[in-house]
Image: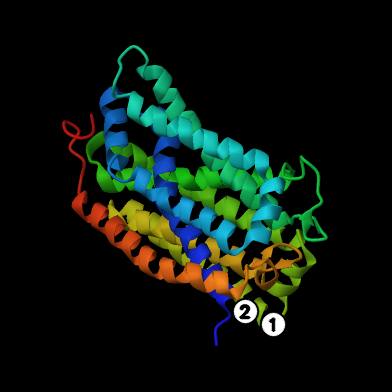
Amino acid sequence: MFELSFIWAGVIAFAVLTYVILDGFDLGVGILFRTAKTERERSTMMNSIAPIWDGNETWLVLGGGGLFAVFPLAYAVIMPALYMPIILMLLALIFRGVAFEYRWRTERWKPVWDWAFFGGSVTAAFMQGIALGALVQGIEVTDRAYSGGWWDWLTGFSILTGVAVVVGYALLGATWIILKTEDKLQQRMQGFSVWLGIGTLAFIALVSILTPFQNPDYFQRWFNLPGSALSIVMPLAVISCAWALFSGLKAGKDLQPFLAALMLFVLCFIGIGISFYPNIVPPSLTIVEAAAPDESLLFALVGTVVLVPIILAYTAYAYWVFRGKIDPDEGYH
């Protein structure tokens, strides 16, 4: 019989990964927003994500709400440890959402909302990376409660992962704009994607090298059998994605670079999962220890089995309806 806590860990991992790859590219569009040369280009960039950006954040709510409901101990440890980056991330997302709506309603204040959209996107991405780095380096737990300091989340490693996520999201955003636009804007994003791809791969390599040294368990998991086999397989998979990314950009393809960039994030997420397992809060809080009683897990799972397919269906439908290139003369106003 499957352990319910592991089923729920998979559900939350899926929700977080889906959030990262979906909201990642629209945050990336915001990160690249100031590179637009004209108001027409800025409007085109925003219109490329207008029908879907708020729906993408559904997965963030599912991941965070699921953690609170089914892993209350993990939630109670992670929140005090990461209050500051999480609050800053949420404020940035709020500013970004307000800017998205208000910039179309005014001419006088449009530059202010443009900067708010850009700043909110960069800040949200950076804080997500900071939170990831803080989790990877480990959270101090004593007697089932957070026992670290207020600033433990802010380290050289977490800043590195924060910058890495900003660059990676920018790559997703650039490849998304390639997929959705034409002419000069698309050509410029093709050039950006090459450099952002190189930067993303460099950060992946650097973070991958440093991660095993954050915790002895990580080192043992990656460099002892059977984990050592993954130390060969994962880099080969990343190299394959890198080849698909750059060959697609060179050939002028629209979809291939975007899919390759998404796969880089999927592989990184799998690598983090391998490092963490069986912990949900490294280095000492396991999935089983942090889980709610089985009765609660089963009750919540019943609703999730119904809701997740519905969310997937309407998400897929939205992307299908708004498929194809953006017409710069039409869109969200």
Let me know if residue 194 appears in the view.
no
Q: In the rendering, at what x and y percent does residue 166 appear?
A: 53, 42
Please state, as top left, top right, bottom left or bottom right, where the C terminus lies in the image: top left
| Residue 129 shown left or right of residue 308 in the figure | right
Residue identifier under label 2: 229
| Residue 205 shown left or right of residue 61 in the figure | right
Residue 306: quadrant of the picture: bottom left
> Is there CB contact under 8 Å for labels 2 and 1?
yes
Q: How far apart are marks 2 and 1 (CA)?
A: 7 Å
Which is nearer the eye, 122 or 57?
57
Write the residue at 72% across / 78% down. Answer: 224
Give the numbered dot on residue 276.
Answer: none
Q: In this view, does 286 lie above or below 320?
A: below
Let me know if residue 322 appears in the view.
yes
Q: Is residue 167 above or below residue 222?
A: above
Q: Which amino acid, mark 2?
A: Ala
Q: Which amino acid, mark 1?
A: Leu
